[in-house]
Every structure is written in C-alpha cells, then in structure tokens.
Amino acid sequence: MSALVIDDIGLLVTNDAGLGEGALGAVRDAALVIEDGKVVAVERAGADGDDRIDAGGRCVIPGFVDSHTHLVFAGDRADEFAARMAGKPYEAGGILVTTEATRAATDEELRELTARRRAEALGAGITHLEIKSGYGLDTDDERRLCEIAAEFTDDVTFLGAHVVPPEYEGRADDYVELVCGDMLAACAPHSRWIDVFCERGAFDAEQSRAVLEAGRDAGLGMRVHGNQLGPGPGARLAVELGAASVDHCTYLGDADIEALAGSETVATFLPATDFSTRQPYPDARRAIDAGVEVAIATNTNPGSSNTTSMSFCIALAVRDLRMTVEEALAAATAGGARALRRDDVGRLVPGARADAVILDAAGYADLVYRPGVPLVAETLVAGVSLT
C-alpha cells in the first residue's frame, strides 16, 4: 500500500495533547504519514513515503468541521441584510422568503447551487460539514432537500421544524403533527439528525420536545437551535433529551450553563450570525470557564450568515467571544466533530481520516492576526488534495 507524506511541516496541529505540545498537541518540524485515506503516523520531518507533499515549513491543521450549515437553498436575501444594517431587527420569519424560492427551484438547480457552496467551503478549509433541510417546509420538498444534502455529506439534518409555513398559519400544532408524522417518515431515510428551532417566532418548548422525541424514536440523533433571540428553553431541553448540540447560544443564563457543563451536549456558537444580525455576541468565555464543551460553526445560510469562511468565524470568536486562538481553532475542528459525535474527523492522529489544511502561514495565529486574508493554501480530504 502506497504512503503519502506531508513533509517539512513547520507546525502541525494534531488536537491530541498526547502527541505534542499543549491542548492542540502541536508538533514542530513534523511529517504526516497517510495511507488509504487515513493518518497512520506523525513523524519527524523527512519521513519516507511513496508520494510527497512539501509543506515548505508552513503550518498544517486539521480540516475545519462545520457542524451547522444550511447549504441547500435557492434565492437571495441581500435586501433583507441591507435593511438590517440600516436598523431593522432580525426576525425568524425571513426564512419564508427562502422557502418560496427553494420550493420553486428544480432539483438540478438546487444541486448546482449546493455544489458551488460546497466547493467554496472546501477552498476555505472546511473538510467535513453538516447540512440541514428546512427551506421546503412540506413533505415532498423537505424530502428532496434531504436527498440532495445526502449527496454532499453523511451528516444530514432534517429541519422540517424550522418555522411554521404560511399554509399552517395559526395552526402550529397541526404543522408539528405533520413534521412528526409523514414528513419525518419521508426524510428519516436520508438523514442522521433531527433539529428544531426552539425560539419565539418558531416553536415553543412543548412543540420542540414533540419534534425531537419523534426524531429520536425514528432513530435520529437530536440537535437544537436555541437561545438565539433571547433567553429560552432550548439549551436545557437539549441537555434533558441528550441532544448532541444546542446551536446559537447567544443568551445563556446561569441555569443553562450549569446544565450544559454537566452534560455531553455541545454548545455551538455561530459568531458570523451575530455579526450579520447585530445581536449581542455569546459569552463563550463564561461557558468555557464553567466547563461547557463548545464548537464554532458558520451557519451558512442566505438570511443571517451568508459565509463559508470558518477563518472569519474564528477571528470573531477570538475578538468578540473572548476565546483564545487555541480555543477557537479547537472549537472549529475537534469541537465541531464532538458536536457531530464523530471521532474520525477534526484531528490528525493515527486512525483518523486524513483531512488536513496547509496554511499559507507559519502558524495558526495568522487566522486571527490576518483577518480576511485567504490563508488556505491546500485542502486535503481523506488524503486527496481538492484545492
């Protein structure tokens, strides 16, 4: 079996403290040995191999793991963004604008749009991502969104409970019944997860519980959109039901943090969303100091976070969420993997998938030090260069 060696790595981030320095397991003057798409060894520079990539003394990090995206959609909401920048507050109802455009799009149009966004994310160093449905909001459209998402990832999330569609206005409980019944049955075969927007303007705690429990009973893992627009029950509901993550977490009270710190539920912060919506940034420092497991994700979507740049999210996390550079990088890699309950990505250790990013920099601090500069020189997924 032939071996690929990424050699002359000035600084290698493994995310395993047992392999190197600090919590990131940093190794200097390293080589990464890859066989059959997996890491087989971390060695000193100059390791033997059949094929070789010369990192030229640059920094190599695990590929970013984006645990929260909405990649399958049609339409544009630039006017909404401009209005928000002029002072209009963010509201969840804008989702319906995208729903109308997405329903009108053909499968091929949606597939092409998703492929373009996935390629953009790869160029930004995102080697694995989760994709949600949620812009169909009827059985047939949610099913086709899950089917298309499954062509790009094995972490598909059924989000029929995104908002209540216009045809169910005033009948939210009836819509929840549809989500938990025919819609779930149509989408579960194409999905790994179920999610719900537990928020004012979307679904309350009782409705959210019904959705999550129905998904769990159908064999899906649970995720929650929660505590974005104000204090609410989302975080504690996620912990109570054993959800893998609760995402947004802009407003976390003492009870929320206490519950999260004593659980395996990951708090996933979406700082580009808070940037775009002009919401307050989460107090990640407080959560981390309390022992909460955290992740960072892009929340790529047309309304509140139209970006595929994890580097941008890392820079915001350091500046505005008061995370250290090391914490932010770990949250965007190993943290995202934990939020998806995976151990095969987010790390560069023997046995893990060889998802690596060669930075055009000597160190990872440049992701924050040089914000907005495209620093991804090469992206490898399972040992194959894709950029």
Image: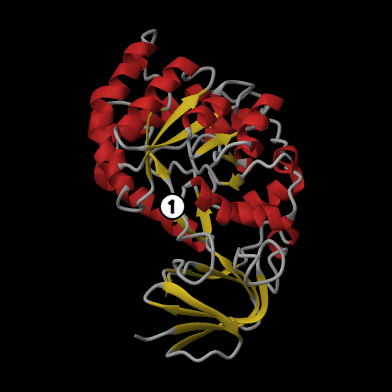
Residue at mark 1: 117
Q: Residue 262's x, y, as percent?
A: 62, 36
Identified at 61% across, 65% down, the residue is: 16
Q: Judge left or right: residue 219 versus residue 259.
A: left
Q: Residue 235's x, y, as percent?
A: 57, 29
Is residue 1 visible in the rendered image? The answer is yes
Is residue 136 visible in the rendered image? The answer is no
Quarter of the image for residue 193 reads top left
Figure quadrant of the N terminus? bottom left
Relative vertical location of residue 145 with respect to residue 42 in this rendering, above or below: above
Quarter of the image for residue 75 reads top left
Q: Residue 50's x, y, as percent?
A: 42, 90
Q: Judge left or right: residue 138 versus residue 8.
A: left
Identified at 35% across, 37% down, the residue is: 220
Q: Amino acid at mark 1?
A: Arg
The one of 76 and 385 positioned closer to us in this rendering: 385
Identified at 54% across, 60% down, the residue is: 124
- Find numbered disc 1 in the image and state the secondary structure of the residue it sits on: helix
Q: Residue 387's x, y, as percent?
A: 46, 70
The one of 83 and 216 positioned closer to us in this rendering: 216
